Amino acid sequence: MQLQQLASFVAVAETAHFTHAAERMRVAQPSLSKSIKALEMELGARLFSRARGNVALTPAGEALLPLARRMLADAETARREVAELAGLRRGRVRLGATPSLCAGLLADALARYHRDYPGIDLIVEEGGSRDLVGDLARGRLDLALIILPLHSSDPALVTEEILVESLVVASPAGAGTVGPRDSAGDVGSTAEGEGLAPVAGRGRRAFVRIEDLRGKPLVMFRRGYDLREATIAACRQAGFEPRFAVEGGEMDAVLRFVEAGLGVAVVPSMVLDGRPGLRGVPLAPPGLRRTVALAHRKDVEPTRAAQAFRATLLSYLSEAAEEGALPQGVGLAGLPME
């Protein structure tokens, strides 16, 4: 079994067409067909069925596909690792991160890494934690910043907790809302009844209860976002089903929809930096928090370039914490938050 044969097999599986696969591999179609036939003889099973011009995977082909993708990814990692032995002058880091981190802390950490290792290619994949975990398992990422906990069905990963961030309820900054309760229990004015009612807690810091979201229109993320699951779970634990005004968005779309007055959304506090059109109100203690972890596959040692990125990221976060430069509502894992 040769890597070229596996690459040809994956190309046919992904294109469902021998001619298109040959074009992708930049080989003649007869050569590609010969490579597939040799692989089938090696394995003792047909990998594709051809009926009326349609190419489809057989059960044997379906079983081989994820393994072939992983072997090809591991081979590429080996090539990169050997190239990096020259002192990290060459290499690549494929990093996955949630949208809130891409819009916040990650940019400065990447800038520092690029300054220290200008020859390393940086590839960033933005997505929800479940999507990133899948990409790690398939060998499409070297590292990923994901949200814990992992699900029981997730693949075996090595995770390192690095940050804890608070979730807040985002609403339009200029919308009419019920004001904080004063010491006598009187409530301030309200607009059209769609606003939330922040309540003054200790030190008169305003907060809202998860129960205050009952019946309120919510702007909800697409499936695959951990924020979607966290919000729905919190509402159900409080005894009600959330009402969606609109759903299916990415982070930027969700924030824009909230700005436009479609509803409110539960988001990480850090994403509200630089958005004067939005305000964030913390949830009542104990509130909602989530833990951010740096993850990689358990069966694959990270490349030297990936290890160098980890060191750069942790150094940057530690310095930012000491200088008080972390976004509001964000702290280092294992340390108390203000």
Image (spheres, rainbow, N blue to C red):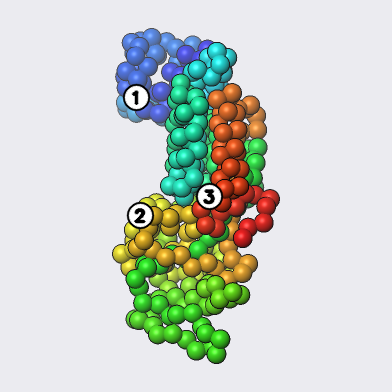
Q: How busy is the neighbourhood of tag 1: few (under 14 within 10 Å), some, or many (20 plus)?
A: some
- 73 and 121: which one is in front? 121
Q: Say the numbered circle drawn on residue 17.
A: 1
- 140 and 92: which one is in front? 92
- Quadrant containing the C terminus in the rendered view: bottom right
Q: Which amino acid does label 2 sit on?
A: Ala
Q: State yes or no: discs 2 and 3 in contact (Cβ < 8 Å).
A: no
| Circle nearer the viewer, 1 or 2 | 2
Q: Which amino acid does label 3 sit on?
A: Ala
Residue that numbered label 2 is attached to? 253
Q: Which amino acid does label 1 sit on?
A: His
Q: Is residue 65 above or below residue 135?
A: above
Query: How far is disc 1 from disc 2 in space, using C-alphas?
Result: 36 Å
Q: Position of residue 210 (x, y in %)?
A: 54, 71
First along the sequence among labels 1 and 2: 1
Q: What element carries label 3?
A: loop
Q: Position of residue 271 (x, y in %)?
A: 44, 54
Q: Position of residue 275 (x, y in %)?
A: 37, 58
> Residue at 47% of width from left, 86% of height from top?
187
Q: State yes or no: discs 1 and 2 in contact (Cβ < 8 Å).
A: no
Q: State yes or no: discs 1 and 3 in contact (Cβ < 8 Å).
A: no
> Residue at 60% of width from left, 28% of height from top?
307
Left or right, 109 with reference to 195: right
- Identify the residue at the far front of this view: 323
Task: Quadrant for residue 246, please give it.
Answer: bottom left
> Residue at 47% of width from left, 13% of height from top?
4
| Circle nearer the viewer, 2 or 3 | 3
First along the sequence among labels 1 and 3: 1
